[in-house]
Structures are given as structure tokens and as C-alpha cells.
Amino acid sequence: MTKVLLIGWDAADWNIIRPLLEKDQMPALKRLMDNGVSGNMGTMNPPFSPMLWSSVATGKTPDKHGVLGFMEVTPNMNGIRPVTVTSRKSRAIWNILHHEGLKSNMVGWWPSFPAEPINGVVVSDKFQKVDPNPQKTTPIKIGTIHPEELTHDIKDLRMFPYEVTEAHILPFIPKAAQIDQEKDFGLQSLANLIAQNTSVHAVATYLMRETAWDFMAVYYDMIDHFCHSFMKYYPPKLNGVSQEQYDIYNKTVIGAYRFQDMMLERVMELVDEETTIIVMSDHGFESGAKRILKMPKYPAAPALEHRQFGIFVAAGPNIKKNEKVFGLKLIDIAPTILHMYGLPIGKDMDGNVALDIFENPETPRFIDSWEQVEGDFGEHDSYELEEALSDTETMQQLIDLGYVEKPDEKLEVAILKTQCDLKHNLARVFIGKHDFESAKPLLLELIKHEKPIDVIPYYMDLLSISLSEQDFDVAEKYLGKLRTMNKMFQINTYFSEAKILIGKGKLDQALRLLLAAKERQPNSEVWYQIGIIYRQLQKFDGAKAAFEEAIKMESDSAKYHQALAETLIRTGDFERAAHHALSSINFIKYYPAAHYTLGEALEKLGDLQNAKIAYETASRFVVKKNSRMDMALENVEEKLLNQNEPNDKVSSIYRKNQIVVVSGLPRSGTSLMMQMLHNGGIEVLTDFSRKPDESNPKGYFEYNPVMSIHKDNSWLHLARGKSVKVVAPLLKFLDPQYRYKVIFMNRDLTDVVKSQQKMIGRDTDNLPVDLLNAYRKHLKEVEIWKDKEPGVELLYVNYKDLMEHPEEILPEIISFIGLELDGQTMLGCIDKSLCNW
């Protein structure tokens, strides 16, 4: 019989866990990892715990499940309260298991109040929230526990902060006696956290011993709350932290992790080997240079301390042993657990079954949606809370942690602020899903508000969207608006300004801005943006160095590794490129650009079979059709086919609609090549807008729209099956959805410039050095462009060789194009008298 125990450690982070594992200070987790799988757990935007844990439970993103923040407006619209389970609009794992006749126990899940009437036990997140004042009682309210009659058996399992003794405190703060409790309230915070999480653990172990269950979920917020309170004191010491405070509190976070591991050890003793145990966190927590000492005035600002990767560990029957797994997301947990029970996954779930964790994976089954299935799911029919702001303990904790502001005394203002926060969180969910069209209307509606609503965060998100959409004029407008607003709100605008400058082609200006920012406040993102500019400037050594600096500061950033991998391909270091592309995929499995870059590197290394797999994976994960990925895959498939049985079959499919491009620098023989192709039997795309003249008596064969291809390349479909002339600097603006055979005319640069000078009647003895250097740069850019575009094949044709030995060069040209052409007629176009032009 399948049994699954799901344990949530809010904010647990590998960066803190790994050193403890090496010192054997988290033995229970180590044992679980040795007997199972472990890896990163990707979080979502925004990283607010009630939203994230609801996504874990449902397999859906917050726009679907409906939990959108820490607070909610009451159903009668007359008040606000800490978020309740009634905000959740999707069925959770335990609801589905209830429908299937299975028993579930749930302890402390956030949110879970009021307790749902499922088959099993629910001890909601309100249970452990008690008043710290020993003079006050904290009765267990109706709705805290299901079934209600269990309240009598477990009410005394709650621990109160005033019960925390010196023996409890000293393992966390050995120098607690040095604390001046009149000024420093750290011990009060510690006592609250110890008491609450001990209460959760006591109930969880009681239920494991005393009840029958098929599925059990236990949520601990201890690590997250310890980190928010004490991470500023975690080693190494930050500037701005006093030595006295550091000496007192520097072991407190480590103590939380070790205590959490001790609780895990006890839980593991209470299950048998047939139980699958999953330990996971919803996000990580900054423990390095990005730690925040002074929290900015920002809604739910403490979430700025969260990192994008949490932890995942699983062990049990059919789980692989001592292996790493990659690319897991919060929304994968519910589908994976349903799969363990042999139940189908709803097609409307956003997550996938984590098949990689199983020794013998079975094919998942699907239904359209569990929401459409009729029957008893252990849900509330209706539930009305008596007092909107009665949950004072939860409310006060959220206020103390900085997740919510103290509600405004004017009830209508408190309601408005909560409604705005919920709408903003929904917009941020859409931004995280790159659904900008759904996010923008929400944000545009929000910026219409005036005081008491702070609209700065809404403008910042609109700025972010406009940058993502490359609408740099609009981005500039939002940036200007932000700079006129509240100067107390600290906004680092240099990233946005640099992106706008880059978008407008002002690369040198953007680089100066970022280099200055790097000197003031070096961080990984500054180095990354510097690397992006260097790469656009084709200064690949500089780009490589910048991306390496970014990785030194933030080693688990998928985009930094992908950027370095792409750069290493341009420098010819294909093995390192493949390594960093794989590192990127290890952090984010569903990252199309990283899979594509891996495919590029493997193709260059000659590993065509694995390159094919990488390109296929990239195409599968990409949201919109990507022509480069499709063509790269076609290229590898053709190479593999021709490897074993050389033939022309696959190539012929593409030749029918290919575009033959004749390119080169001006006066390098492009008009001659166009004439040859025209006479050889390929239709030329030209409008004859430029008439033959003394410099080019046989015609230019130009097409006027080519001159503005950088603004509009939508006409390129007219060139399919034809030839068109595109000068070298404009090649990069060709639409990648088509395949191109580029015949690039090479001519000695001195001869090119002399011919140009002669054509415009200037001195041919003193050639402009700047022009020569610019042309050398263009030729280098063409080589790089050709190498990164899978839809481009390029043949260099030397003008001098063509003029002197056309009969040797012509077969190579015809073979390259791959069509039957009239070679004799093409040879007849060669006029050696024009060689000096």
C-alpha cells in the first residue's frame, strides 16, 4: 500500500545545508539523501509562502488556485484577515485522495484554516499561533482542527513561548546571557519560533503514532522565520553588523537547521521502509553578499531575501538511490504524488510528473481536470469567520516579520490596500509566466490609484515588462516617471537605463554606466549585463571574463551559465561550453536557450546524436515556435542521415524554398554574381530601381527594400526560390525563419576601397584607414553571424579567382546552390575588362 510523507521546510537552502552535511551536523537529511534523490527546487514569482505552498498542494500556479498573498478580503467585503484556505479555488492533493477513499493527515500547512473536512486529520496553521503573554489564554478556535473532537486529545501539545527555558535557548545562542533584553528582543523572537515549531512537530509525531494514514503533509516555517530574524548575523560577518551582535547570534541560523534535522530524525523513526519521504522547500534564502541589513519600504519586502532555488530530497520504494535530480518545480510535487498513488494527473495542472526520480517510471495517466469530477472531495460548502480581524496572533506575526503592514485604522483604506496587493501579486504571477498581456491591464489599473497607495512597485513592473518586450521608448517613459517619485524609495535604476541604452544601440554609453556601477557596488547582475554588452560588441574575451565574475558571485544562476556557454562557443571552446550549458540545465530543466546552446556545443564536438536530443528538448520547452531551433534540428538530422547513407534527399526538401543571397562589401563583385545567377536560371528579386551606369554597365540587380531591412524584413518571403543582393553589414537582419545560401564575394580590401574611391571620384592613392578598419570589422561580424545561424550556409568566392579562373570556381558555386544551372551562360557573364573597377 502506497504511503507518502511530505515535509515542508520553508526557505531551506543548499548553500547552508551543504557545509553542515560535510561536518555531519545534519545526519538525518544525509541518510535520506544517501538512500534517495536530491536536487534543486525552482520557486515562482512572487516568492510568497502562502501562494507557493498552495501551488505545491495543487500543482497549479496562483492565478489558477486563487491564493494570492498573505492577506485576503473577507467574503462580505467588510474587513481583511490573514489568508485562509477558503481563498483556494483548486483541489489539493488531500482533496483528491479523499475522493479516492484514502486517508490524509495535514499539519500546519499554510494556509489550511479553517480545517477542511477530509478523511483523516487536519491541524491547521492557526493551531501553533499563541499569545506570548503568559497572562493571556489562547483558546483553540472552532475550525482549527478536523475532526473537532480531536481537539481534546491534542490541545496540550501546544508549546507556549514562556515555556521555553535556558536549556532550549543555549543550543541556538550560546552567549544568550550577554543579551540586554531591555533593548534587544532577539530572545523573545527565538522563543516564539521554537514554541510554534515544537507544537507542529509534537502534533505531527502524535498523529503518525496514533492514527492510520495513507498520505501526510507537515509544514514547518522555522527555517524561514529564523533566517528573517537572524540571517544578518550568519557568517561571514557583514559590514554594518556590530561585532557584539555578530558574536552573540552568528550560530543561530545553523542551530535552526540542526534542530530541524533532529525533528526529521524522529519523524523517520516513525515510518517504515515502504513509506516515501519527501523533504522540500518553497524557495531558498540569501546567505551571502546579497543579505539585506535594512529592509526597503516595499510590500512584503522580506521576500527580497528569498533565493530562486529551494531543496528537494526524496527516498522510498521505487526512488533512485544516491542520485541527483534536476529541474524540479514546485508545481511538479502534486502531479508526482498523484502518480505515486496510481492516480491520473489533471491536464489543467501546470506541473509535470518528476519521472526522473523513479527507478522504474511508469507512464502517467491524465484526465482533463479534477475540478470537473463530481463527488465528495472533503471541501467546505461555506464557511464564515465571525470576526474579520480576530486572528490577532497570525496577523501580529506577519506584521513583525514585515510581510504585511499594520492595517490602516480606516477600514476602507485597509481593504483597498489589500485588494491592490492581491491584484499586484496576480500581475506578478503573470509576469513570472511571461504572460505580459494579462499583467499589463492589472498594473495600468493599479497606477491610477493615488495616496495612500504606493504606486512605485506597479511602475517598476511596467518598466520591467516594457524592457522584456523591447519597447524601449515606453521603458524610458516609465523610468523617467520613477525618477520623479519618492526619493526615499531606493531604486537602483542603472540596470534599466543600461538596457534602454542597449536597446537603442548606444552600447558604449551603456557599458560606461555599468562599469561605473560595478565600481560603486559590484554584484553578479552588473557583471552579467557587462558581459551581454561585450558579447554584442563581439569582444568575446571581455564577455567571458564578465560572465565568469558573475558566476563567482552567484554560482547557481542558470542564465549566467547559459550566457557563458554561448560565449565559449563563439571562442571555440566547445567542451567548456557544453559543461556550462549542462550546469544551466541542472538549475533550470525547462530552459530552452540552455538546451539549444548545449546542442550547438555538442554539434561542434561532433556528438550529433546527443546534439539532436538537445535541440529536440529545446523545441519542446520553447513557448513560441523558434525557427533557429527547428533548423538546427533539421541540420543535425540531415548530417546523421548522410553519415550512414549519403544522399541528397533531405537537402532537396529545403532547396525548393531557400533564398540565395549574394553578399559582400560594396564593389566586391556582387553585381557580377547576381548577373551570373540570373543568366544561369535563378530568378532575381529586383525592382531595377538603380539603373546601369559607367561604374556598373551590366546592372546592379538591387532591390530597394533591402536598404531598410533593419526596420522591416517582412518582404523576405518574396525572395523564396530566388536570389537577392544584401550587402555584408545588413546580413544580420535576415529573418531566421528562412533558409539561406549566402554567396559572399571576397575581394582584397585595398582593391575594394580603391574601386569605391574611383566610383565617387576621389583620390585612390590615400585610402581612408577608418574605412578599411570598419570593413575588417564587418567581415569578422559576418563570420560570427554565419556560425550562429543554423539556417545559413555560406560560400566565400574570391573575386580575383572568379575573374581569372571562372571554370574552376563555377562548379563549386553550382554545387553549393544545389540546383541545375546553365553553367556556360554563367561563364559568359565574365568580362575581364571590368576587373579594374
Image (cartoon, helix red, strand yellow):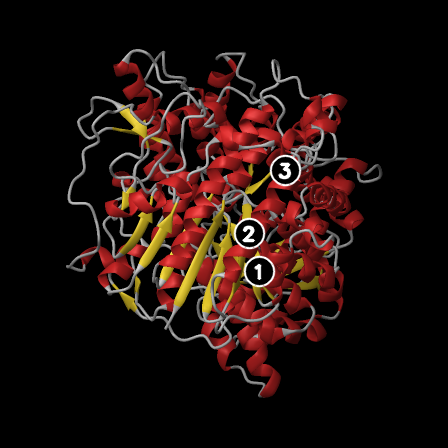
Return the residue at label 2.
311
User: Circles 1 and 2: CB distance less than 8 Å?
Assistant: yes
- Of label 1 and label 3, which has the lower sequence position? 1
Q: How many marks?
A: 3
- Answer whether labels 1 and 3 touch (C-beta < 8 Å): no
Residue at disc 1, secondary structure: strand
Give residue 833's quadrant in the image: bottom right
Question: Of callouts 3 and 2, which one flags the residue occurring earlier in the amino acid sequence?
Answer: 3
Query: In the image, what residue occupies the spot 50% across and 56% down?
Result: 267
Q: What residue type is labelled 3?
A: Val
Circle number at residue 38: 1
Q: Residues within 10 Å of mark 1 (few under 14, many from 20)?
A: many
Residue 265 seen in render:
yes
User: Is 17 placed above or below 243 here?
Assistant: below
Q: Disc 1 residue type?
A: Ser
Question: Can residue 700 be spotted in the picture?
Answer: no
Residue 567 position, x and y percent, is 69, 51
Cα distance between the residues tagged 1 and 3: 22 Å
Q: Where is residue 122 in the image (x, y as percent from the top left)?
A: 31, 48
Residues 705 and 307: in front is 307
Pointer 3 residue: 253
| Quarter holding residue 81 | top left
